[in-house]
Amino acid sequence: MILDGKLVAKGTREEIKKEVQAINKDGKEVGLCVVLVGNDPASLVYVNNKIKASNEVGIKSYLYKLEADVSQDEVLALLDKLNKDDKINGIIVQLPLPKTLDETTILNAIDPKKDVDGCHYVQKGKLWTGNPELIACTPFGVMKILEYYNIDVKGKHAVIVGRSNLVGKPLAQLLLAKDATVTICHSKTKDIKEIASKADILCAAVGKANFITVDMVKQGAIVIDIGINRVEGKLYGDVDYDSVKEICSYITPVPGGVGPMTVTMLLYNTLKAYKLYK
């Protein structure tokens, strides 16, 4: 069965839109600011999608474009200004950043109350101590898909291939919080094929097209493909979809699976930040 992220995203955005419309009727606004550094074509596409989605649900969007050679002090000064701006409830700095900038320092300069991408160490700490507020959007979207399709992860063995701060690590905690048994694999893991093939839930977030092949998937497993890889102008996930779909019970496609949910949960978090900290 295909886990349709577009369907889940559509319903979630409709709910967000209704809440935002009610806020707007009271003469108030929910505001999301996106900061883009440089001119990376892929980043520009992602940013435009976020701005478009924000406007569609009635969230006021702000976009700051900075040159690739901007100094770190200039970026930090902008974030300080945005942190103090009452019109803005959520701030996201589009990644990746130019190598001249320190990603950790910049992400942690965002007010955690406005950290709608869940990257600040305060929000990460709240997640890991069982008190989540603003959760990293992609793993949050994965959990919403599982919830929508009534997939109970309790007691299941979940294997995550990828240990990034944005996806792998927070997804592990979210699954643990739902009583799954979690294994994280990465580039130094031995026998990934053997480990993956024992997973009840297999989550691929490694960033390599078609990395997960059919011989790495257990019959009847739930497969969550979080990868987005562009090869010769075409999008591929981390999972060899055509072969794996024949043996698994559920699978997310690429595109149309986790991707739409990432942007949707950004909107969700922005509205939540407004309600928590207005």
Image (spheres, helix red, strand yellow):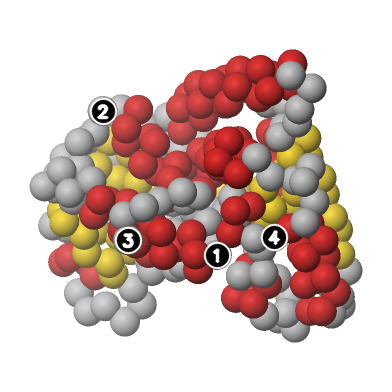
> What residue is drawn where x is 16% and y is 56%?
181
Label 2: which secondary element? loop
Using the image, tell me which numbered label, if any, was put on residue 129: 3
Q: Earlier in the sequence, mark 3 or mark 2?
A: 3
Identify the amino acid type marked 1. His
Which residue is under mark 2? 150
The picture quadrant where one finds residue 66 is bottom right
Identify the amino acid type marked 2. Asn
* Dot 3 and dot 2 residues touching (CB under 8 Å): no
* Alpha carbon distance from label 4 to label 2: 33 Å
Q: Nearer the viewer, residue 107 or 86?
A: 86
* Alpha carbon distance from label 3 to label 4: 25 Å
Q: Nearer the viewer, mark 3 or mark 4?
A: 3
* Alpha carbon distance from label 2 to label 1: 30 Å
- Does 177 sit above or below residue 39? above
> What residue is drawn where x is 78% and y is 35%?
60
- Does 138 sit above or below residue 72? above
